[in-house]
Image (cartoon, rainbow, N blue to C red):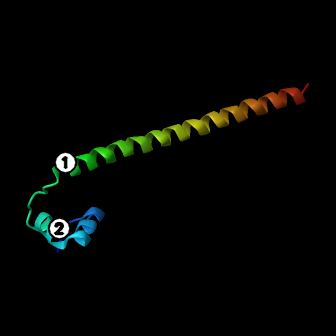
Amino acid sequence: MSKSHQRIIRASEIAQYIYCAHAWWLGAIEGYPSQHHQALSDGTAFHRLHGRQVRTAQHIKVLAYLLLGSALVIGLAGVWRLLSR
């Protein structure tokens, strides 16, 4: 199979295949649409929200390290000033 015709198989497809190989075949190979539109929509919304929460947590972590570094520099400057008197 050439690279242009290769298809990426996602973890969710493997899980669907393990759960029901026939349902996977109907959707992935035959192209029948899923009957679980609401569940798929809810899952997509949940994953988007979770992704935003992870990015926010990463930004907060970076900010915390910057603040910690700033406090350390200020503290060292204060100690230096006291010791150099």
Residue 7 is left or right of residue 83, and the answer is: left
Residue 16 is left or right of residue 34, and the answer is: right
Q: Do callouts 2 and 1 mark residues in contact (Cβ within 8 Å)?
A: no
Residue at coordinates 78% horizontally, 33% vertically from top-left? 76
Residue at coordinates 25% horizontally, 46% vertically from top-left? 42
Q: Quadrant of the N terminus?
A: bottom left
Look at label 2 and name its amino acid: Trp
Percent of width and height locating residue 5: 15, 67
* Residue 68 position (above or below residue 33): above
Element type at marker 2? helix
How would you rate the neighbour count of disc 2 (Cα within 10 Å): few for under 14, some for 14-19, many for 20 or more? many
* Residue 4 position (above or below residue 39): below
Q: Residue furthest top?
A: 85
Percent of width and height locating residue 46: 32, 46
Residue at coordinates 52% horizontally, 37% vertically from top-left? 60
Look at label 1 and name its amino acid: Gln
Percent of width and height locating residue 21: 18, 72
Disc number for residue 22: none
Residue 2: name its quadrant: bottom left
Q: Which residue is mark 2?
A: 24
Residue 2 is left or right of residue 59, and the answer is: left
Q: Which residue is mark 1?
A: 38
Q: Quadrant of the C terminus?
A: top right
How would you rate the neighbour count of disc 1 (Cα within 10 Å): few for under 14, some for 14-19, many for 20 or more? few
Percent of width and height locating residue 80: 83, 31
Element type at marker 1? helix
Q: CA distance from mark 2 to mark 1?
A: 18 Å
Mark 2 or mark 1: name the one nearer the start of the chain: 2
